Image (cartoon, rainbow, N blue to C red):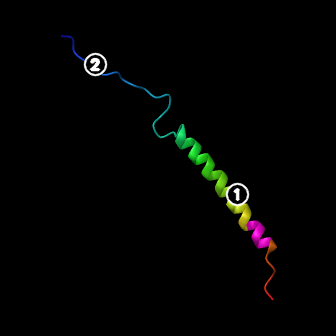
Amino acid sequence: MAPIRKAHTTTAGPSHVPSGAALLALELSEIARGMRGLDILRRSVDRAPPA
């Protein structure tokens, strides 16, 4: 019987580079963080100065 060999899988890039779902999650979190930051700035402008 021939020995069983496991297929060696290789990735296109290094393991520390996010790809696929992880990359999408990072992108969406950056967009959400930016929108939240703009919302905070807008609220500070709309707020009346202290009397």
SS category of the residue bearing label 2: loop
Near mark 2 (Cα within 10 A), the count class, few <14, some 14-19 or many ≥20, is: few
Q: Position of residue 2 (x, y in %)?
A: 21, 11
SS category of the residue bearing label 1: helix
Q: Position of residue 10 (x, y in %)?
A: 43, 26
- Name above or below for residue 30 compared with residue 13: below
The residue identified by callout 1 is: 35
Q: Mark 2 or mark 1, which has the lower sequence index?
A: 2
- Name above or below for residue 5 compared with residue 26: above
Q: Say left or right for 17 vs 40.
A: left
Residue at the (70%, 57%) spot, across then down:
35
Q: Say left or right for 5 vs 44.
A: left
The magenta span reads 41-45
- Asked whether residue 29 is drawn in magenta, I would say no
Could you say which quadrant of the image residue 48 lies in? bottom right
Callout 2 amino acid: Arg
Residue at the (30%, 22%) spot, across then down:
6
The quarter of the rendered structure image containing the N terminus is top left
Could you say which quadrant of the image residue 39 lies in? bottom right
Q: Nearer the viewer, residue 14 or 35?
A: 35
Mark seen at residue 5? 2
Residue at the (36%, 23%) spot, across then down:
8
Q: Main secondary structure of the magenta part?
A: helix
Q: Position of residue 37 (x, y in %)?
A: 69, 62
- Name above or below for residue 36 compared with residue 2: below
The residues tagged by marks 2 and 1 sit, at their Cα atoms, a distance apart of 51 Å
Mark seen at residue 16? none
Q: Say left or right for 8 vs 5.
A: right
